Image (tube, rainbow, N blue to C red):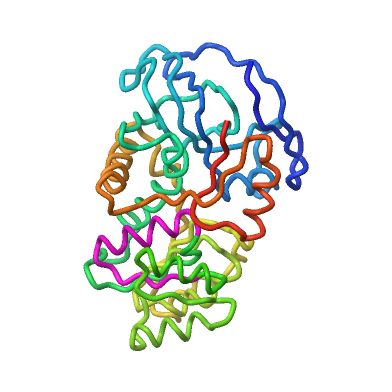
Amino acid sequence: MSKAVQIRKNGGPEEMEIVDVQVGEPGPGEIRIRHKAVGLNFIDVYQRTGLYQLPMPLTLGMEASGVVEAVGDGVKHLKVGDRAAYASQPPGSYSEVRVMPAKTVCKLPDAISFETGAAMMLKGLTAQYLLKRTLPQGGLKEGDFVLFHAAAGGVGLIAVQWAKAMGLQLIGTAGSDEKCALAKSLGAAHVINYAKEDFKERVKAITGGRGVKVVYDSVGKDTWDKSLDCLQPFGLMASFGNASGPVPPFAPGILAAKGSIYVTRQTLFTHIATREATQEMADDLFAAVTSGKVKIRIDQTFPLEKVREAHVALEARKTTGCTILTL
């Protein structure tokens, strides 16, 4: 048996209940893992509220670290006793023990703690595919300007450090002076408090009127329109979240009027659809962390029993960096 956080219907944090679930043996291509720490992400909120629809009852959670307890047939890259971490479909990481597909579970380097492993996988792999794989025409080179919304969040604080290591001029936005200062201290070249300032005007001023090559946006509805106006001709609008709500429908002709710009809606799980791609991206992330180029900040820790409080804090934008649940 394992304790797990489940919902039986979509709704607020009060829908989450800790229940006992039966955990069996792994089948072909699966492992059983005993969690040491669990990562909290905004996608968990989307699934809880029903923005992303999933069958019920639903055990939440997309990210965790732990120790492999059993290995099914065909699994070659992991063995019993391995330290491991993952960001993976299907949900289920809000639990003590689970059986899950092995293909997106990676062996965790000894130099990285379980807590860091749980905090870094979904957010770090997201930063990796954005900065390394979701690129404007001609790619990104040293000195290029990029705009990154929610720069003091879990993905944002990883991205600002990684962008600095790549030589990019990252302009980060956040909703308070304190969050802006945090992003600036970790590597953002410029910061904008969009609760006080018009970020479109500031971006134009910072870039001498040219705009940025790419906007990375997990906020959604509230930042969409002005973000399009921040782009250079042929620039890329890369949407990867909906923290303020989904983007309303728009006419494709607006992309022509704003400079023949591109729009893409990305998700991590397309990028980690194969074992080979997952490992390649994870190796890049592990190297960035173990080298010290990227430090994983865990600014909030809640026991699994306080998961409702964790969700309330996340939705209220009261968190910075990464948040983990401990077992």
Q: Nearer the viewer, residue 223 or 304?
A: 304
Residue 275 vs 285, above or below: the answer is above
Q: At 54% from the left edge and 32% from the top edge, which residue is drawn?
A: 90
Kindly give the residue lying farthest to the left in the view shown. 142
Q: At 27% from the left edge and 72% from the top edge, which residue is drawn?
A: 144
* Residue 245 x, y percent position in the rendering: 64, 61
Is 255 included in the stretch rendered in magenta? no
Q: At 66% from the left edge and 50% from the top edge, which residue is drawn?
A: 51
* Residue 230 x, y percent position in the rendering: 43, 78
Is 172 included in the stretch rendered in magenta? yes
Q: Quadrant of residue 163?
A: bottom left
Q: What segment carries the magenta color?
A: 153-173
- What quarter of the picture does the C terminus occupy? top right
* Residue 274 x, y percent position in the rendering: 36, 34
Answer with left or right where residue 156 lies relative to residue 176.
left
* Residue 53 x, y percent position in the rendering: 66, 42
Q: At 58% from the left edge and 25% from the top edge, which residue is drawn?
A: 96
Residue 299 vs 305, above or below: the answer is below
Answer with left or right where residue 269 lies relative to residue 42.
left
Answer with left or right where residue 254 lies relative to residue 282.
right
